[in-house]
Amino acid sequence: MKFDEIIYTIKKLAEGGGITSDDSRLNPRQINAWISYYRSKLMYDLREKIKKDNSLDQYVQDLGCVKLICVDKADCCDGSYKIYDYYKKLEKPLPKLLGMIGSRSLYFVGLIDKITSIPIGTSLKARYQQYDEYTKERRFCFLVGNQIYFSLPKYDDLEVVNIRGIFEDPDLAANYNCGTDNPLGCEDGESEYPMPGYLIQPMIASIMKNELNITVATRMLNDNVNDGRQEKPQIPSQQTK
């Protein structure tokens, strides 16, 4: 089901099943926030149940070509403090990853061939790697918040990487490189929403019950989900991200 169709279904149910219009009191931005929250919760629960399964691989999002910048390891915003030793980091921090233990929602960090990976570890490992005879000449990265730092061999000219993962807000991930020359382009709400189809109805039901205080009968929900697929959603021409 497409993102615009999900918004349309929620608006239609909230307005009693009638035809939605642009002057609806429900703000699409608020609906977007609800969808992101309940999707994250359902996807997290699902991931915890199938830890050794690859069933969620098809919902991984590709951020495309992500540029790196050089930064002093102190990484102080005003540049007042330096230790004159350098990492590289993402030019733009990641969208928030789906909350999981460790970096399990970060599926791939590597070269833009989408095959050659860069090992993901911890900052503690990065600290000692430079002194290890066997690993000091290897690339290595670690996650701090929504930023990835790269410990690289001297004179390594790595400038761009590819990143794939499951993110809390698919819309932010889809538009991560929007406005750049990235061939993945921008999300227009017309692609399939990255979650299993059988979780969409429970997600909508949770939003209606918990956020709008509406209990929706299963049959009515099924009918409106189907309507959302068939009818053209009337979404404002320019949504606020």
Image (cartoon, rainbow, N blue to C red):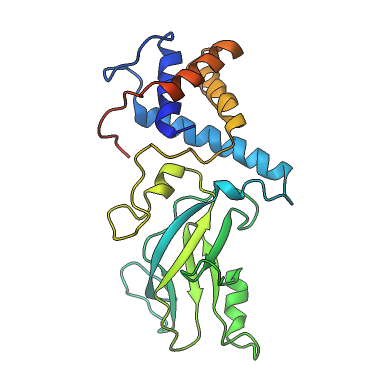
Q: Left or right: 45 with respect to 214?
A: right
Q: Residue at x 37, y 61 (%)?
A: 92
Q: Nearer the viewer, residue 5 or 107?
A: 5
Give how far across and how far down residue 150 sits, in percent.
Answer: 49, 73
Q: Position of residue 218 (x, y in %)?
A: 60, 14
| Residue 13 in view | yes
Q: Which residue is nearer to you in this view: 11 or 99?
A: 11
Q: Residue at x 47, y 55 (%)?
A: 62
Question: Farthest residue in the bottom direction?
Answer: 133
* Closer to us: 197 or 43: 197
Quadrant of the snapshot with the C terminus: top left
Q: Residue at x 41, y 82 (%)?
A: 157
Q: Where 77 falls versus 47 (above or below)? A: below
Left or right of residue 131: residue 180? left
Residue 187 spot, x, y in % from top left: 36, 44
Is any part of residue 217 visible from this angle?
Answer: no
168 versus 78 height, above or below: above
Total residue callouts = 0
- Residue 70, percent across and down? 38, 76
Above or below, comparing residue 32 to residue 55 in the picture: above
Residue situated furthest front in the rendering: 230
Which one is in front, 116 or 169? 116
Task: Please tell me in which quadrant of the rendered image residue 38 appears.
Answer: top right
Q: Quadrant of residue 41?
A: top right
Q: Residue at x 50, y 81 (%)?
A: 152
